[in-house]
Image: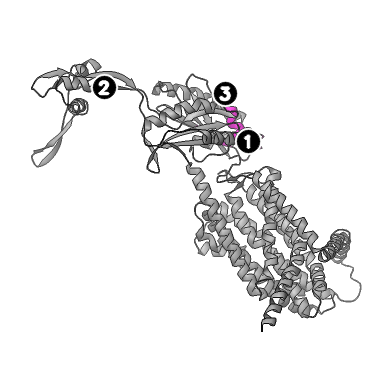
Amino acid sequence: LLMALIVMYFAGETLNMLSILGLVICVGLLVDNSVVVAENIYRHIQDGLPPREACIRGAQEIALAITMATLTTVIVFLPVSLVEGEAQFFLMRLSLPISVALGASLVVALVFIPLSVFLTLRPRKNGPDRSRVVKMHRLLDRILEKTYHFSMEKWQQIYHACLSFFLRRRMDLVILLALVMGLSYGIIFREIEFSPNQEEDRASFQIGVEMSREAIFEDTAEYFQEAEEIMKAKKEELNLSGFMMMHFGRGGNIEGWLDMEEDNQLTATEMAKSVLEDLPKMAGVKLRSGKESQNEEAKGQTVHVLHLEGDDAGVLEKIATDLEPVLEALPGVIGIRSGQERSANELALVVDRNRTESSNVNPEFVAGMVGYALRGQTLPRFHYEGREIPVRIRFEEEDRERLTDLSNFQVPTRDGNSVPLSALTDVKMLESSDGISRRNKRINRSITIDLVPELAKETHAAIQGLTNQMDLPEGVSFGISQNDMSTNETIKNLQFAAMVSVLFIYLLMGFLFESFVLPLSIILTIPLAGIGVVWSHWLTGKDLDVLGFVGTILLIGVVVNNGIVLVDYVNRLRQQGLERTEALLKAADRRFRPILMTALTTIIGMIPLTFSEPSELGLSYKSFGLTLIGGMTTATILTLLVVPVFYTFFDDLRERVMQGFRELN
């Protein structure tokens, strides 16, 4: 960890939430190499070798295997350039501390651990030692030895019996594995949602306020003054560290922050609901809570955004108006919010083209006349004593402050006469938009649907079914939301990065084993790890977010480590003359303890991170932690059985291929 901090300092990196996350991950991974080396040395000492020779041989035997295992973890960060957006940001911040720390741990495991073992396991001097420390040490040794005998040793005996059974009946394991993977990926995986945003309760909440179209600024200010008094009372009741209110013409926002030092019994979502219930109720006022109050596209499961796209804003507005009551009637829909923000009603002079034609007046001249009267017109600059003075001419204010004054404006005709403006126009009150939204070069009209959180999934499906059945006019279609497009793109990038990582790991293992067939038995641990990822999210009811997917890519490099150490030892035993089944059983027995220990260090290291509260920025590590814990658990359990059995399948395949080449020659 110290080496990682030193390199980060000279690389100009800062200690932020993600770099600290990388260091936290390393806490569980750093000891893996040391555990494997120390256990291998200790086994040689138990076999009767002198400590010095045991340390040298133990480190030499395992050096290449743990080097390759470390490289497989580091190599998964190479495809980071293939990923975009949040995923790339997370991977970039994690890659440096993890890579440097793992590299340093490899050096420690191969250089310092053998020395440490040699110094601590030297034979004791003969004769009684009455030291209290020595007595306590021996007592602790006996307790640990008995604990190991009644726990780990029993499990190892059960494991040996299971592996012996499946090595004799290999197809039984294949059928069992197919059933487990079919259930996990065919049924349970479909229940897991991929969320591009963090959906955990944040350390703050936000409430948006939208006034009616008839409201003026004074109405908005009065409403927020009442809301401020309510928030002052809520600050004490809900243990808020503070709140902020901001309002403008016909709306505003209320934001509250949780006091992270207090033991809050309510989540941010529940606090927002409590505030919503107490805010003043006024006709035409709409309240909304959650991330949608900031950005409708950054939606969670409680918001569904529909996008109508076409070439005519009027047609889109009519379809949206007709569609809103239908959507509002669906079960699970709380309310509908128009994505077309409207300004206050405005006074409009609508030119009657029939009257302008009969009066011999150009309609465009009418618009220019009104603009000239109200806004004025810029004249050439006035030059005076070497200075340029801007000049603008328009009617005096008393001649244009009332509608009657405007209606009496005289508009010249083409034949030299003039007619009053009121004879050519009609006065109307119209609703106007702040602007026209465009997506993909087409006019866009969005509808935001607020959903009941408990029924969100069913309501999403109902809305999708309704839109699929609708018969839209020609040229009008439902567009994909920016959030959905971003999600699809993120998933594709992460899947491609994961596949490239698997390819790199496969090539690396091919170099280690001098075979491109045997590594396939270890590659199987990757989909086995996916089983744990699926079940851990399904059992806890959590969605897989971007940080969880980043954890999946990291998991690809971690879960193969135990398989590499196991298969490397099997090959060494076979080179010493042992028969394949005997070599597999012996290697599995001797690697059972270090495999279990390295897996437990990673899993236990992730538990505090998984169950920690979200940060004040709302960044949650639950999905990330569940990914590593679930993946490591299933990968470790199944690796101990699947890798040896499938090793025999691929070894048979290799023998058949070699036999075929020999026959051809």
Report helix, strand or loop for mark 1: loop
Hey, what amino acid is under mark 3? Asp
Nearest the viewer among 490 and 377 is 490
Q: CA distance from mark 3 to mark 1?
A: 17 Å
Disc 2 marks which residue? 349
Nearest the viewer among 86 and 563 is 563
Residues in magenta?
254-275
Is 256 covered by the magenta stretch? Answer: yes
Circle 3 or circle 2, nearest the eye: 2
Hey, what amino acid is under mark 2? Leu
Residue 60, position in %: x, y?
Answer: 71, 77
Whether residue 73 is situated above or below residue 203 in the rendered picture: below
Circle 1 or circle 2, nearest the eye: 2
Q: CA distance from mark 1 to mark 2?
A: 53 Å
Disc 1 marks which residue? 267
- Toward the right, the furthest residue is 128
Report helix, strand or loop for mark 3: helix
N-terminal-most mark, 1 or 2: 1
Disc 3 marks which residue? 278
In which quadrant of the rendered image does the C terminus lie? Answer: bottom right
Give the residue displayed 51% in from the left and 59% down from the top.
Answer: 82
Hey, what amino acid is under mark 1? Thr
- CB under 8 Å between callouts 1 and 2? no
N-terminal-most mark, 3 or 2: 3
Residue 346, position in %: x, y?
Answer: 33, 23
Quarter where residue 68 is shown: bottom right
Nearest the viewer among 125 and 9 is 9
